[in-house]
């Protein structure tokens, strides 16, 4: 609850609503810079920041936490976005050299690449040809780097930043966050995390090792920020690492589907790919551009890398002809570093081992669509932005000599805490946020104070809900960005718990000054407590040239009349030919607890290959249990 209340307050500040506190006045931030590695560059989160070659090469994206902060800081006149994916502390020192003097606020992430983060992910998770010994070697190297020079590297970076800061400026160093729930077993036994398949199992021991390394990294980051000696700026640590765990936002959460787009993963705060065993079509393929090359010379057609055809020999042959280009890129980057000069500035360059040719291929030749894996997604960057803004406020309060901000306990109310029994699927609600706020932007009253705006969604389904914005205190204007963030805060901040593995949402209200946002699921007669797993019953009968199906369900396909779940996944399995399609939602659950009934015909002989193996049901969100009886 403390974190929920904290984030409620962060969003009040984030949108610069009316406040009597001096620490909520951000007009002093006129010069703002974002430096560091891929967590600040925001690889994959939103769209490319611009078409400039430096933004492309560094994989800078426009829904990263510094861009979210920049969007809502009122008086920024000079903004430098220098963060670059893959940069170590040695490279970040170069970013600081390029940073303009006279900075009021600088945010950064640093240290992960000093610990060979990309090599760890490649060696221990992604590379199907790796070994346990190779994984342990790179983990050992990372731990050694952390203990030997990570802290001094971070101190050197902060001291260099301080020389570019205005007096009473603020430096915010954000931490990393642990990726994994290390308690569950399914993700390590039934999922495929390797690329393109195979690889080391993501056991609970491996996941604990990775999480412990993140904790060790964050310890040295915080320690450096606390004890570094600076003369101009206030140095703050934005530690958002507990948030993903608290909000069930990690990989391998209980009940989570291997498919990242499944509703059970709606709260996950990092990018992942589909880890369904042998799900080869999900691996990104096509033209892959080598970063740093122009489009004419840097694109390599890799359609031959279709995973159905990529065996060990293909990988080795592919790696052989890429190797020289990779080494050339490595030599160019190393040549630009004056390691002796860096040592004088307190920076030690890491010595990260590799796991062979294929690891280099993975690290250097994949697109941002793949490179974003294991990085914060939009939800993660929203959390990072909120925590960072709060640290700016705390720093500002200290500089001004006033009491630091506290929590606004009444800002966010979760309806589940009020004993509401109405709930809806996370997917159906999250998919409405942008539409609702866009509808308000185009349809709200003008020149009228205290107006309300409401819109129903998924009417007639178990996931029916009403979305409402109510203005008060004479307010009349509307901020679409505020609306999106406020509604997502309700969805992010309520209902996450280990007893709710399907992430059902009970809705809530969010009071931000004169603006009250609410999401209200309407069905109060659904199965209660909410299901912890989807439920289904399937029967099929042979009808001459057709198979006739009778399917009942609960906990899935609860918002779309089957049109985006059951039906398309059925035709995806057996092709065209579905006839006599019918889908009915019940006014209340039937005697078996089912919420809907679907019946239709398919071509002959589809039961075994599509339904009895749960292929269609699982793809549609119905789980992998139950099969399909009958004689079809």
Image (cartoon, rainbow, N blue to C red):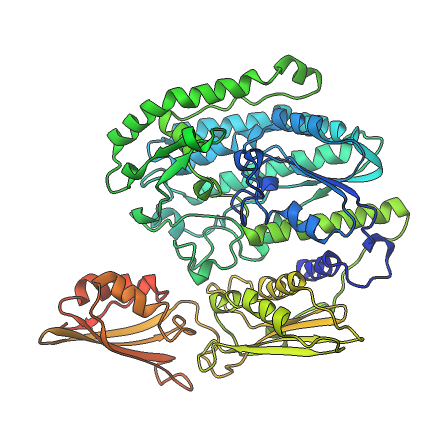
Decide if residue 97 is on the left or right side of residue 484: right
Residue 63 on image: x %, y %: 59, 49
Q: Quadrant for residue 204, please give it.
A: top left
Residue 72 on image: x %, y %: 72, 53
* Above or below, comparing residue 379 to residue 301 in the picture: below
* Above or below, comparing residue 494 to residue 450 in the picture: above
**Farthest-out residue, top:** 340
Q: How many marks on residues? A: 0
Residue 234 on image: x %, y %: 81, 39
Q: Who's the residue at 25% across and 73% down the image?
A: 538
Judge by depth and name the residue closer to the eye, 497 or 153: 153
**Farthest-out residue, right:** 401
Residue 484 on image: x %, y %: 61, 63
Decide if residue 476 is on the left or right side of residue 265: right
Judge by depth and name the residue closer to the eye, 131 or 106: 106
* Above or below, comparing residue 473 to residue 158 in the picture: below
């Amino acid at each position: 609850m403390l974190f929920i209340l904290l984030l409620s307050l962060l969003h009040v500040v984030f949108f610069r609503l009316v406040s009597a506190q001096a620490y909520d006045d951000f007009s002093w931030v006129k010069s703002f810079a974002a430096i560091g590695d891929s967590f600040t560059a925001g690889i994959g989160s939103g769209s490319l920041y611009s078409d400039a070659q430096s933004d492309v090469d560094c994989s800078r994206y426009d829904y990263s936490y510094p861009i979210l902060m920049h969007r809502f800081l009122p008086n920024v006149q000079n903004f430098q976005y220098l963060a670059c994916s893959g940069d170590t502390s040695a490279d970040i020192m170069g970013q600081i050299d390029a940073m303009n003097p006279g900075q009021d606020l600088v945010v950064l992430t640093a240290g992960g690449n000093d610990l060979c983060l990309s090599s760890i992910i490649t060696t221990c998770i992604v590379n199907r040809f790796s070994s346990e010994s190779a994984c342990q070697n790179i983990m050992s190297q990372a731990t050694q780097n952390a203990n030997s020079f990570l802290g001094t590297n971070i101190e050197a970076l902060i001291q260099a930043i301080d020389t570019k800061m205005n007096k009473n400026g603020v430096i915010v160093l954000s931490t990393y966050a642990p990726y994994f729930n290390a308690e569950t077993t399914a993700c390590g036994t039934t999922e495929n995390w390797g690329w393109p398949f195979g690889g080391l199992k993501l056991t609970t021991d491996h996941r604990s090792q990775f999480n412990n390394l993140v904790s060790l990294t964050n310890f040295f980051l915080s320690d450096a920020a606390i004890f570094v000696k600076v003369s101009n700026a206030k140095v703050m640590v934005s530690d958002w690492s507990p948030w993903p765990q608290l909000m069930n936002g990690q990989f391998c959460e209980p009940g989570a589907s291997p498919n990242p787009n499944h509703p059970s993963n709606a709260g996950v705060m990092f990018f992942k790919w589909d880890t369904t065993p042998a799900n080869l079509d999900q691996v990104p393929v096509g033209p892959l551009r080598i970063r740093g090359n122009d489009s004419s010379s840097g694109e390599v057609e890799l359609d031959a890398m279709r995973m159905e055809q990529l065996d060990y020999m293909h990988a080795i042959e592919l790696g052989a002809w890429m190797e020289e280009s990779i080494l050339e890129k490595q030599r160019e980057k190393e040549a630009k570093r004056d390691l002796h000069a860096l040592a004088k500035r307190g920076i030690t360059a890491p010595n990260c081992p590799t796991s062979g040719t294929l690891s280099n291929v993975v690290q250097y030749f994949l697109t941002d669509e793949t490179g974003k894996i294991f990085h914060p997604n939009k939800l993660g960057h929203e959390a990072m932005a909120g925590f960072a803004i709060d640290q700016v406020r705390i720093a500002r309060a200290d500089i001004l000599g006033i009491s630091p901000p506290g929590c606004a306990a009444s800002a966010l109310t979760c309806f589940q805490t009020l004993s509401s029994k109405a709930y809806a699927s996370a997917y159906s609600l999250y998919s409405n946020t942008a539409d609702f706020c866009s509808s308000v932007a185009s349809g709200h009253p003008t020149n009228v104070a205290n107006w309300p705006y409401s819109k129903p969604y998924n009417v007639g389904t178990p996931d029916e809900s009403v979305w409402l914005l109510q203005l008060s205190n004479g307010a009349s204007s509307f901020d679409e960005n505020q609306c999106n963030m406020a509604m997502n805060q309700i969805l992010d901040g309520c209902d996450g718990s280990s007893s709710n593995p399907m992430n059902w949402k009970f809705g809530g209200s969010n009071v931000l000054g004169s603006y009250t946002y609410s999401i209200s699921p309407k069905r109060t007669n659904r199965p209660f407590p909410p299901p912890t797993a989807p439920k289904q019953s399937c029967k099929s009968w042979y009808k001459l040239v057709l198979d006739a199906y009778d399917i009942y369900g609960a906990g899935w396909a609860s918002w779309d009349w089957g049109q985006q779940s059951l039906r398309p996944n059925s035709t995806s399995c057996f092709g065209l030919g579905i006839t006599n399609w019918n889908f009915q939602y019940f006014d209340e659950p039937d005697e078996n607890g089912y919420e809907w009934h679907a019946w239709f015909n398919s071509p002959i002989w589809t039961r075994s290959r599509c339904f009895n193996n749960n292929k269609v049901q699982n793809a549609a969100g119905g789980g992998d249990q139950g099969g399909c009886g009958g004689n079809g």
